Amino acid sequence: MPAANLRRRLGAKLLLTMALAAISAPTAIAAEDEAPDYSRKGADTCFQCHDDQATLAVFRSKHAVPDDPNSPFGHGQLQCEACHGPGDSHAGRVRRGRERPAIPAFGFNSTLGIGAQNAFCIECHDSDTGFAWHGSTHDDNTVACNDCHSLHAERDPVLAVTTQAEVCFDCHQQQRTQAMKPFAHPVHDGKMACTSCHSPHGDTPERLLARSDVNSTCHDCHAEFRGPYLWEHAPVTEDCLSCHNPHGSTQPGMLSMRAPMLCQSCHSQAGHPSLPQDARGLPGSMASDLLLGQSCMNCHDQVHGSNHPSGSKLMR
């Protein structure tokens, strides 16, 4: 998008958003009775007061790339005011007894609503996130862009594979606990990120998956179980989560429970005793095949499906 067009779009969007915010919160964006103006010196005006390291770190971020015409700090752009709105009245002289006019801020102390805060971000990031964001799970739960993203940081932690999970786990505490179990995806090792499976900006019918359904998401990595098979196992074709817990488990293979209990939750009358086998069922010195090694999978080892002509029982 040409720099001039982007500047006009940003300016129009900022003024509209600020006008809407002023209706709901009259003290949020003050500009007497006039439309606010942009400062003549841009960021130089802002940094006269906002000179802390956390703010100055923006110059090491992607938002301050001077050679990028789409960056707020690109040539001819609005710099700080591209996101925080016109700042001339905020930086100007204030009459005695009056408060300094506020400008849009982000985070817990912002006078803007979550929707208004996100509108500033989506105005530029509409091609990759905006079209799917509205009505998504995170949007419905009033999650702000600032809740996950560090806008002034040189490296946004949520965009790095090694640090992304900790950002997500701030809210998703149950998944943090599951990921610490003995059998889990290598998220804590920095070899896999939450976005390997999930799309945080969009939405599938459930779970914010990167693909249209659970199985398609799993098969991106586990292609060997994609099939089709001559002899299929119904739970496998329907939903991988019928047997697996994707965030972590105490059972090998990230199974939701150990065999034979897992198998017998469906196969209650499949030619074997319908009750779960345990140590009390061991006849003297003879061990049950349903307790040793892979349990049911000692025999039915092709649980994901079989292409063998005689593989109807998933045994070969």
Image: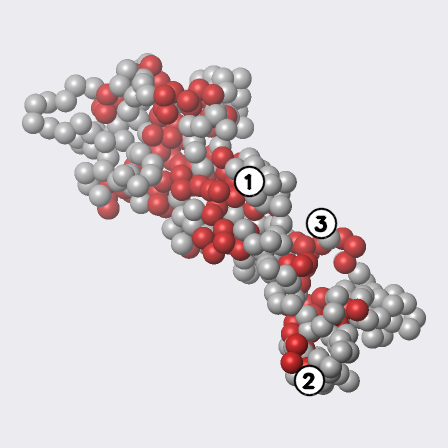
Q: Pointers 3 and 2 in contact (CB under 8 A)? A: no
Q: CA distance from mark 2 to mark 1?
A: 52 Å
At x 45%, y 37%, the residue is 149
The local secondary structure at tag 3 comes to loop
In the image, residue 136 lies at what x, y percent? 48, 53
Q: Point out the residue furthest to the right here.
A: 309
Q: Mark 3 or mark 1: which comes first in sequence?
A: 1
Q: CA distance from mark 3 to mark 2?
A: 35 Å
Q: Nearer the viewer, residue 81 or 238?
A: 238
User: Compared with residue 212, is residue 78 higher up or lower down, i.e. above or below?
Assistant: above
- Which quarter of the figure is the N terminus placed in? top right
Q: Nearer the viewer, residue 289 or 10?
A: 289
- Asked whether, in this view, residue 315 is left or right of residue 122, the answer is right
Q: Quadrant of residue 91?
A: top left
Q: CA distance from mark 3 to mark 1?
A: 23 Å
Q: Amino acid at mark 2?
A: Ser
In the image, residue 310 lies at what x, y percent? 91, 73
The local secondary structure at tag 2 comes to loop
The crowding category of the residue bearing disc 3, from other C-alpha atoms within 10 Å (few below 14, some 14 to 19, many at least 20), is few
> Is residue 113 visible to us here?
yes
Q: Amino acid at mark 1?
A: Asp
Q: Amino acid at mark 3?
A: Cys
Q: Which residue is mark 1?
A: 128
At x 85%, y 74%, the residue is 312
User: Compared with residue 183, is residue 237 higher up or lower down, i.e. above or below?
Assistant: below
Q: Which residue is mark 3?
A: 221
Q: Which mark is residue 274?
A: 2
Q: Mark 3 or mark 2: which comes first in sequence?
A: 3
Between circles 3 and 1, the one closer to the viewer is 3
The crowding category of the residue bearing disc 2, from other C-alpha atoms within 10 Å (few below 14, some 14 to 19, many at least 20), is few
